[in-house]
Amino acid sequence: MYFDDLTFTKNSDLFMGKSININDDGFIYGNMFKDEYKPYKNYSVYKLKGKTDRENLLIKIMEENFIVTDLGLYLDLNPKDLDIYKCFKDHETKLREYIDMYENKYESITLNAKKDNYTWENGPWPWEVDK
Amino acid sequence: MFCYKKMLNYPVNIKNKDLKMAKLIITQLGGYAGELSAALRYFCQKFTMPDDEGRALLNDIATEELGHVEMISSILHGLMNGATKEELKEAGLDGYYVEHGKGIYPLNVDGVPYSALTFAVTGDPIVDLMEDMAAEEKARIVYERLIDYAKTDDLKAPLLFLRQREVVHFNRFKDLLNKYKTNN
């Protein structure tokens, strides 16, 4: 199974980090840009916590992947914004590092993972559930 | 081309079956405001965007939406997990079960199979972008109503995430539309 029993904790702290536009916690908000975040009613965002080291590393990979995706959309239209590009590059590096770290210890996330044997078919696949 | 990563855009970990919610959420797979419609809309429109910024944005949002198709499908799979055929019947999903078992098949909330008629491709970037902004708003309002009906955090969390992505995509399409309008 992909996640055993993920903990969703309501995050009442709406502090979004230091930099002017970027929300350091953007992943759990679904939006990297503070001034564009639109809450729905009084629903809070959720902090995510896995049960194992594997699950928590996976969450970090998803987070870095999200940051690169969302900043990427902005950079598609604003490629000359060097501050955002620097942030994009830092997280892109982290994403690669975390994926390497994960694939060294656990199953492949990418087809071209460095493995001695072909193990791509090994789960858990993201939609797999327990029962 | 597309390159699969063995993960979702945001974690999905549905803990309890909920067939009533599955029957509603399936519309975000196969309905007019669904993720499949979104992915295909932007994918098809990218070919007639007039510059690199437009091509990049439509391409990248289409790719993200394909990931959302997988998220919604994973949610549905989790919500139907462990359900008996009696429970499916009770939830009004006996017809679904007869044809699809517990497979994932794109339908709207009224049980109509997915149709490409849920979106338009006009070949005109201004008109397409206005369609895209409307589509993001339609998807946002549907997610809000689904969130209202969702009872548990494991379901609210991914729905809130997907709703916020509609807000972000709306803003990016608006930025691009404004650029084209200014240049024309």
Image: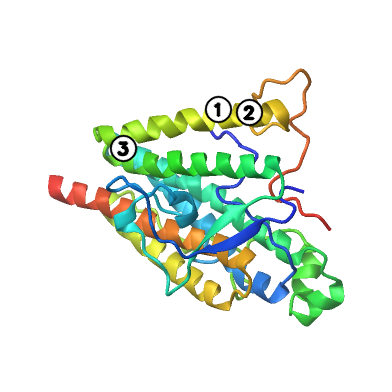
Pointers 3 and 1 within a single chain = yes
Q: Residues within 10 Å of mark 3 (few under 14, many from 20)?
A: some
Secondary structure under tag 2 reads helix
Who's the residue at 68% across and 76% down the image? B20
Give how far across and how far down residue B118 sits, in percent.
48, 63
Residue displayed at 72% across by 59% down: B77
Which corner quadrant of the image does residue B103 belong to? bottom right
Earlier along the polypeptide chain: callout 3 or callout 2? 3
Which kind of residue does numbered mark 3 sit on?
Ile
Chain name for mark 1: A
- Residue placed most toward the observer, B75 or B106: B75
Residue B84 vertical position relative to residue B120 in the rendered view, above or below: below
What secondary structure is found at the residue carrying circle 3?
Answer: helix
Looking at the image, residue A129 lies above or below residue B156: above
Chain ID, mark 3: A
Q: Secondary structure at mark 1?
A: helix
Q: Which residue is mark 2?
A: A101
Residue beneath label 3, please? A84
Q: Is residue A95 above or below residue B122?
A: above
Tag of residue A97: 1
Q: Residue at x 53, y 77 (%)?
A: B148
Return the disc, 3 or 1, that comes first in the chain's sequence. 3
